[in-house]
Amino acid sequence: MASVVTFWQLPDEEQRFFDYMESTGEVVAITTLRVYEQSEIAPIPIRQFVANNNSMQLYIGLKTLIVANGIDTFIIKGQTRYGLESMKSNVIGYDRPVFLEGKLAQSNLFYYNSYPDIAKNSMISKDRLFLNWAKKILNWMRRNTPEKVMYNGFPYRATKAVKDAVSQGKIDLCS
């Protein structure tokens, strides 16, 4: 089962989120892409990852809790590639706040509480320390996106700055 928070925040509000995460421990990031070398999946500090990669999506986690059991091999068009399996790994998926064609894209945080065993007969719970940390991170974002903005007829979480900008017609939203 997955836990998810969908919200809108402005790109310049992201640093506050990073500040909070870093107060919980050494937070690292990993690419969501399928890469040619396993070394490209190595976790690096989140701010360094963001500075070096213009990635809209990434996996985040505590350095002490990320384990290699989630690295899978994929064959794509006859070539071997590697990628992190978010369902198995102690990571949170994060879609960053960015403007796409002048519209603010929706952000998400998600993690899986458990994953199926190899035979897919039962579910394996993730590490309790990871689950506690991940819940804390998503709850922080819920508290910091208390406002509601309408998108496609549904209310979604947003920061006060986003709600004000939408209400004033300064920005448009996209999913």
Image (cartoon, rainbow, N blue to C red):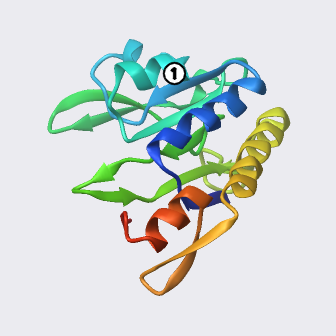
Find the residue positioned furthest to the left: 77
Residue 44 position, x and y percent, is 52, 15
Q: Is residue 11 above or below residue 20?
A: below
The answer to which image quadrant residue 86 occupies is top right
Q: Is residue 51 above or below residue 83?
A: above
Residue 14 position, x and y percent, is 54, 39
Residue 165 position, x and y percent, is 46, 63
Q: Is residue 98 left or right of residue 124?
A: left
Find the residue positioned furthest to the top: 39
Residue 33 position, x and y percent, is 34, 35
What is the number of callouts on the image?
1
User: Residue 4 versus residue 126: which sits nearer the camera?
Assistant: 4
Q: Is residue 37 above or below residue 100?
A: above
- Density class for disc 1 (Cα within 10 Å; few <14, some 14-19, many ≥20) is some
Find the residue positioned furthest to the front: 168
**Can residue 36 be seen by looking at this rendering?**
yes
Kindly identify the residue that appears in the image at 75 percent across and 41 percent down: 126
Q: Is residue 115 left or right of residue 82?
A: right
User: Residue 109 versus residue 85: which sits nearer the camera?
Assistant: 109
Q: Amino acid at mark 1?
A: Arg
Kindly identify the residue that appears in the image at 33 percent across and 35 percent down: 74
Give the position of the N terminus as an image quadrant.
Answer: bottom right
Kindly identify the residue that appears in the image at 55 percent across and 56 percent down: 161
Q: Secondary structure at mark 1?
A: helix
Q: Which residue is mark 1?
A: 47
